[in-house]
Amino acid sequence: MLSDNLGVLFAGRLAGGVSTTLLFSVFEAWMITEYHRRGLATSDLRLSTVFGYMTTLSCIVAIMSGVVGDVLVATLGGRVWPFLASIVCSVSAAYLIVKTWVSVREEKERERDNAQSQGWHDTNIGSSRSRTTAPSQ
C-alpha cells in the first residue's frame, strides 16, 4: 500500500468511483454527440454497433490488464505495482489525448475562422471587380 491512513484509502476509493462513473458517462455522451455531428446516422454504421465494439474491446482490455497486473505482482513481488502501472497508463493516455484530440470548441473556432477568411476573400474579390468595372452611362 502507498498509505496506511484509512481516511486516505477511503478518499482514494471515493475518487476512483467518481472518476470511473465520469469516464463512462462523459465518453458515451461525447460518442453520441460526435456520431450525430459527423452525420454518421445517415451511414451504414449504427451507434449500437459502435457501442458493441467498444464493450467488447473494453472487456478484452480488462482481461489483459488483469493478466499484466498478475505478472507484475509475481515478478516484482508487491501488490502495489499494478496500481503504479495504471498511473503510468493514465498519464500516457492523458498526454496522447491532449496532443491528438481536437475539441468541439477548437473545431468550431477553426470553422468560424475559415468562414471569416472566406468572407473577406469574397468581399475583396467583389470590391476589386466593382473598382475595375467602368460605370455605365
Image (spheres, grey):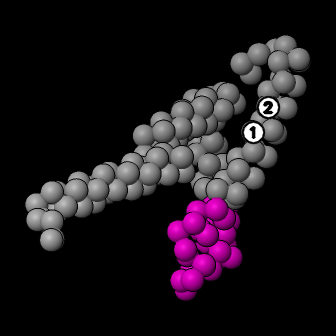
Placement of 68 over or under 2, stated as above or below: below
Say which of 18 and 108 sits in front.
108
The answer to which image quadrant residue 20 occupies is: top right
What percent of the width, then of the height, locates residue 93? 52, 41
Q: From the image, give the main secondary structure of the stretch colored magenta.
A: helix
| Quarter containing the N terminus | top right
Residue 113 in sight:
yes
Magenta stretch in the rendered image: 31-59
Could you say which quadrant of the image residue 127 lies in? bottom left
66 or 49: nearer the eye? 49
Left or right, 19 with respect to 34, comes to right
Residue depicted at x 85% and y 13%: 5
Question: Does the stretch in magenta take in 18?
Answer: no
> Residue 61 appears at what percent x and percent y?
61, 56
Q: Are marks 1 and 2 in contact (CB under 8 Å)?
A: yes
Measure the alpha-carbon separation of dots 1 and 2. Answer: 6 Å
Residue marked by disc 1: 19
Give me the disc on residue 69: none
**Label 1 amino acid?**
Ser
